[in-house]
Amino acid sequence: MAEAVFLTLKLAVLTTILLMVVGIPIAWWLARSNVWWKEAVGAVVSLPLVLPPTVLGFYLLLSLGPQSPLGQAIKSVIGFTLPFTFTGLVVGSVIYSLPFAVQPIRNAFEAFGEEPLEAAATLRSSPLDRFFSVALPLARPGILTGAILGFAHTVGEFGVVLMIGGNIPGETKVLSVAIYDYVETLQWGKAHVLAGGMVVFSFIVILSMMLIERRMRERLT
Amino acid sequence: MSARDDTLSARFKGALGSFRLDVDLTFPANGITALFGPSGCGKTSLLRCFAGLNRLDDGDFSIEGEVWQDGKTFLPSHKRAIGYVFQQANLFPHLSVSDNLAFGLKRLARGEREAAARRFDELVSLLGIGHLLDRAPRKLSGGERQRVAIGRALLTAPKLLLMDEPLSALDFEAKREILPYLESLRKKLSVPVLYVTHAPNEVARLADHIAVIENGCVLASGPLTETLARLDLPIRREEGAGVAIDAEVAEIDAQWHLARVAFPGGSLWVRDPKKPVGTNVRVMVLARDVSLALEASENVSIVNHLPATVLKIADGDHPAVVAVKVDVGGTPLIARLTARSAVLLGLEPGKPVFAQIKSVAIVE
């Protein structure tokens, strides 16, 4: 049981870090770019919001599997194919949770408008410097929201995990899959412990996020 | 050639969205040039062209030998030595007042940075913001915010200071609080300032030179007194139209609390401004406070009578009214009269008259 909890946290932490590395630049580009096809990119990023996780998992399984060109390319670089590995789970989780991280960050970048960036430009701040010294600090509440939503979502995902991760203890058997297992094998007591723990955990995450975000926003107005 | 009679020239031409700008402007490299005109006339767009925030393909501007824009070059904003004061103070909410002030300063090249840092304390006390340094911008009043924004812009050691209606977002009290700071800056700064406004009283108080902008073009540009007295410009139709005159306190009448201020061509009695003899002051004579008489009449309550010569008569803002420009020993004045009076007095260019001035405001 502890193994599943630890694995889940490891997956969620890694995924969140990657979500920030990938999601912040995507959100910035979506907020600032003027190209006409940017909303198409925005829609692709948002697809996991509406697709059943099993559909996403199915295509990830196919495209990352040993039969696909992408899967073969990945295998030639890292030496193994991604499905049914922890690394594969991280990749799937990042894709699955991307819209939950990108959307609030994009909103935050759009909310403060041109003015602070123009002010910075007139104060000798280069475009890259403006991003780090002005845009990122001003978007802090949105970035925090994005990180927490991405984290919480990864902790709770099930469909994608089952499709591309399977149920390998210590490798891909995360909390949600473990709960499913306990229920299937009628170990309701253990299922209760994990499920109840998830409810408490989720409540604490959401509450602290709302409180921290409110304080941040107050300080930025 | 001394620095004082140096001038700067700029040309910007092109479309911004549906708006067309076609500006050719020459202004002094010293002192404040007001860009004056109604809302939507393009003055802010013009200012943004100087800053590099708007880009018109056809433009030319160089300052101190450095090309900011020409056929080949377009220097991005962050490489231009500008200070820009926005309508809204636009302080960074995540930084304290002192970090806001230091934002541009920290990004200067080494040599410039040390010189500018030495001015930090002086500027902070000049703007009266020393007690605010540790505060967050959200804890400041509107006037305080704008003073910090002015300080922040000046600490970048600008070669050109651009101010976009810095007072328009402030209430009356805050305006009154901030104007004295702007006036003291005007006296201490050696940087050319472009000051966008549609308020004639700000022009009268602060500007040395004025460019009147209408529909994206410069309608007229010249020294303040001369330009304000031109009858062919829309500025005289504005509420509070009049002439600003630079004068000097010449005599104080302590008994009646009056002072005589002298200007080329004459002098005026005004309320004692509590300034020593010899101080430079600027006075504003509004067109509606000037009436004309054919002879000097002693038995009226008006104290200021000046011999003058009619220069020009133009239509006023209403068919019943005319604007008459007169010359007082080289200084122009404008009088707002009824058209009937003008005919009854037989006013025509060259006719000698007496200008009776009901009230004179000291604007600084």
Image (cartoon, rainbow, N blue to C red):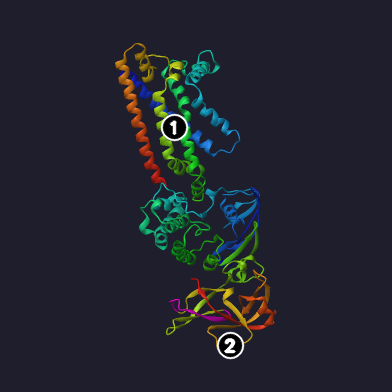
Q: Is residue A98 above or below residue A120?
A: above
Give me the chain letter of mark 2: B
**Residue A88: within the magenta?**
no
Can you name the residue that lies furthest to the top here? Answer: A185
Question: Which mark identifies residue B297?
Answer: 2
Residue A82 position, x and y percent, is 46, 17
Amino acid bearing label 1: Met
Of B179 and A178, nearer the camera is A178
Residue B238 position, x and y percent, is 59, 66
**Residue B270: within the magenta?**
yes
Question: Which mark identifies residue A20?
Answer: 1
For residue A94, which quarter of the picture?
Answer: top left
Q: How far apart in space, not on screen, are marks 2 and 1 (Cα)?
A: 83 Å
Q: Is residue B56 above or below residue B309?
A: above
Report the quarter where the N terminus of chain B lies: bottom right
- Which region of the structure is painted magenta? B264-276
